[in-house]
Image (tube, rainbow, N blue to C red):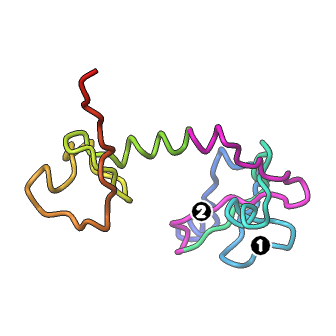
Amino acid sequence: MAGQDEDLVDVDPHDDGSFPTYRWRQAPKGLATRRQLRTMGLRPGGRDPVAQMTCRNGKRVAYLYRVDLAVPKIPMTLAKEAALDKAMAARQTCPQCHRRYYHCLRLRTVGSCEECHDGTPADPSTYTAPPATCRLAA
């Protein structure tokens, strides 16, 4: 009976063997991760990954894309930059004191900055003052 157990092989029914897996720093030339493509000024361009790379004993997986099929990154426009700044302002601005911090606030859990939440004084170098409002009578 012991001889039969040694012949058994664990097979994944969803794996057809066409998706190669490489270990850390063992991938062939011409394949790159998204970050590596980004540093080259490229992006996958809607292409699916052709392989994967594992690290930390298989606990982490990074998908690999072909460099020759990658396309140039789309440049940032003023409209995109304005939209990104508006989205970041929503995450960095305290709804109570209206200070904009240089880091994202915990608005979902705390709901405000630390100073408004529990009185912990904030370092003045970590935020910008709220814009002054004009209250002149017309």
In whole angstroms, how far apart are the C-alphas of marks 1 and 2? 13 Å
Q: Secondary structure at mark 2?
A: strand
Disc 1 crowd rating (10 Å Cα; few below 14, some 14-19, many 20+) is some
Q: Secondary structure at mark 1?
A: loop
Question: Residue 107's quadrant in the figure?
Answer: top left
The answer to if 66 sits in the magenta stretch is yes
The residue labelled by disc 1 is 27
The answer to if 76 sits in the magenta stretch is yes
Residue 134, percent from left and from top: 29, 34
Q: Quadrant of the C terminus?
A: top left
Sequence-wise first label, 1 or 2 = 1
Give the residue at the far left of this rendering. Answer: 119
Name the amino acid type tagged 2. Answer: Val
Residue 22, percent from left and from top: 71, 70
The residue labelled by disc 2 is 61
Q: Nearer the viewer, residue 92 or 15?
A: 92
Name the amino acid type tagged 1. Answer: Ala
Is 46 placed left or right of 134 in the picture? right
Boundaries of the magenta span:
56-82
Q: Are marks 1 and 2 in contact (CB under 8 Å)?
A: no
Residue displayed at 84% across by 58% down: 66
Vertical side of 35 occupied by 79: above or below: above
Q: Nearer the viewer, residue 86 or 39?
A: 86
Question: Residue 50's quadrant in the figure?
Answer: bottom right
Is 87 placed left or right of 70 in the picture? left
Disc 2 crowd rating (10 Å Cα; few below 14, some 14-19, many 20+) is some
Specify the label residue 109 is tagged with. Answer: none
Give the residue at the far bottom of this rendering. Answer: 25
Vertical side of 10 occupied by 134: above or below: above
Vertical side of 73 occupied by 24: above or below: below
Residue 117, percent from left and from top: 12, 50
